[in-house]
Image: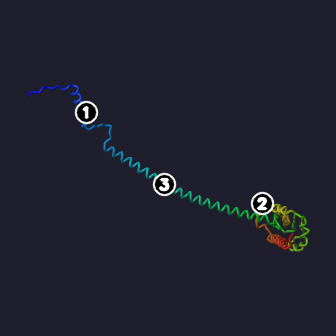
Amino acid sequence: MSFGRRTIPRPLVACAATVAVVLGLSAVPVSSSADPSLGQLKSQLGAEQAHQNSLASSISSLSHLISSLSAQIALVESREAAVRADLARDRAQLAAVQRALARERHLLALESDGGGGQPHALQLGNTAGDAVARATRWLPLFAPYGIAQLETGTGGADVGYLMAQGSAVGEIVPHSQRYFDVHHTTEDTIDKVNPRELQLGAAAMAALVYLVDQHGL
C-alpha cells in the first residue's frame, strides 16, 4: 500500500518554529544585573525596619514630652487660677478698707518735724479756726514739759493736708537754736540727742493726744 506524499506549507513551518523558540526562551530563567539579590533585599528590609524602630522611639519620646508638658501646663493654669483668686480676695479686702477709711474721720494728726530739742510751744489748727481757743484751757497741763504757749498753725508738711479733710492738726515746736548744728550732716547721730529734752517732747505729744481723745478739739 502506498500513500500519497503531502507537502506542509512553508509559512506554517516558520510559525511553528517561532513558537518553539519562544517557548524555549521562556523556560530559561531571566537574569539581570540591575535586579537586587536576596541578600540586598534582606539588607534593605533590615535598614527599613531599623528606621521604623527609630521613628517609633522618637514618637514615644515625643508622647512622653507632650504628657510632661501637659502636666506642667495644667499645674501653671492651676497656680494662675489660685493667684487670680487671691488677687480678687485682696482687692475685695482693699475695697472694704477703703470704704471704712472713707467713713473714718481722724480726730487729730500730730507731727514732730523740728528736731528733738526742748519743746516750748504747740501749734494747733482746724477747719473752724478755733483750735487754739478751744485748747487754751489745757495750757497749764503742759507747763511741766516746758510748753508755755499755743500757736495757730496748719500742722507740718506731713499732716497739713488732713486739715482740709476735717481733722484737727498739730505740731510740737522745740527750741531751734541747735537744730542746724548737725541737721542733715554726718554728725546727725543719736548720741547728739538730749534724752531729757526728747522725753519732754514725747510726753507733751502724748498728753495732747490723750486730751483730744477725751475731750475733743
Residue 75 vs residue 109, the one in the foreground: 75
Residue 64 is situated, as x and y percent measured from the top left of the image, at 48, 56
Please tell me whether mark 1 sits on a helix, a strand or a loop: helix
Residue 161 is situated, as x and y percent measured from the top left of the image, at 83, 61
Q: CA distance from mark 1 to mark 2?
A: 122 Å
Residue type (three-letter) at the residue carrying disc 1: Val
Which one is earlier in the sequence, the residue at label 2 or at label 3? 3
Residue 156 vs residue 47, the one in the foreground: 47
Mark 1 vs mark 3, foreground winner is 1
Residue 38 vs residue 143, the one in the foreground: 38
Residue type (three-letter) at the residue carrying disc 2: Thr
Residue 185 is situated, as x and y percent measured from the top left of the image, at 77, 60
Residue 96 shown left or right of residue 32 in the figure: right
Task: Tell me, for residue 143, which label it has, or none.
Answer: none
Q: Is residue 202 visible?
A: yes
Residue 137 vs residue 47, the one in the foreground: 47
Q: CA distance from mark 2 to mark 3?
A: 68 Å
**Residue at which label 2 appears:** 185
Q: CA distance from mark 1 to mark 3?
A: 60 Å
**Residue at which label 3 appears:** 63
Residue type (three-letter) at the residue carrying disc 3: Ser
| Quadrant assignment, res 215 | bottom right
The image shows residue 45, relative to residue 118, as above or below, that is above
Task: Tell me, for residue 22, which label it has, or none.
Answer: 1
| Quadrant assignment, res 98 | bottom right
